[in-house]
Amino acid sequence: MDNGQGTWPFMSANLIEDPQATHTFQDDLELSFWLLLWMALMYTPSSESIRPRSLLVQQTFESEGQQKWSVLLLQTILNHNAYLPNNPEPPLFPNQRSLYLLLGDLADLFRTRYWIPELVDWQALETMETTENVVHGLKEKLSAYQYQQCQQRLQDHRYTIKCFSCHLEGSDWPEDDKAVPQELTQKDSWEMDGPKKVTLLQSKHVLELLDAEEQRQLKPKKA
């Protein structure tokens, strides 16, 4: 999973934390989330200004992925209430509700790989299961119950595929949904003579693709 220049940008948080860990199919399922998020950040207009988006891309995909845990566990950029009326925080992708909800559901699923409910949460679930006349839907809101459900869904690939399918069938996808390359901006590079501004017009991954396309066009065509 090493591309010769560090960790592969889309590998799971589990393999980044422990390169010696056994590579499982759950790691491959989680990869689908990171690939989708990267594509969305690089080619979909977002509510983030250029600088925060650039920092997000760098820290999540280009700097050993140290922010991946934060994205999953804290869901710092995926707020499930973002589309509710009068919500002060706009959704990350304002015009892509289905995409945003798909990313949120996948984050909920994979976050349980790195989080275990506390004892009090399990006790609350046990009490709920032994209590008669429980209010409908109350147990489903318990964190321990949600953890159990996600752990079961991670035992095979079918739920992840179903999650993609259900959201792709949604009616909130724009009709003219073409890729729009997003500009990245500046970052601070500390050197011996002090901070130096380095302009990043695109992610290094996009640059690699552009370089490959440029080389292809420069090749002489066969007669």
Image: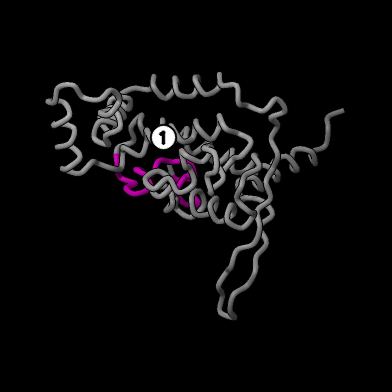
Q: Indicate the quadrant where residue 211 lies.
A: top right
**Which is nearer the eye, 1 or 200?**
200
Q: Residue at x 17, y 36 (%)?
A: 124
Q: Position of residue 33 (x, y in %)?
A: 47, 35
Relative depth, front residue between 5 and 166: 166
Residue 31 belongs to magenta span: no
Residue 67 on image: x %, y %? 44, 52
> Where residue 45 sits in the image (x, y, percent)?
66, 42
Q: Residue 162: x percent and y percent? A: 44, 19
Quick one: label 1, few (<14), some, or many (20+) residues within 10 Å?
Answer: many
Which residue does the image show at 49% across and 20% down from the upper left? Answer: 166
Label count reads 1
Residue span colored magenta: 2-21
Which residue position holds label 1? 30
Predominant secondary structure, magenta span = loop
Quadrant where the C terminus is found in the figure: top right
> Is residue 13 part of the magenta span, yes or no?
yes
Tell me the amino acid under the disc marked 1.
Glu
- Horizontal relation, residue 163 to residue 92: left or right: left
Q: Name the residue at 29% across, 37% down.
A: 22
Mark 1 falls on what kind of element?
helix
Q: Quadrant of the N terminus?
A: top left
Nearest the viewer among 93 and 223 is 93
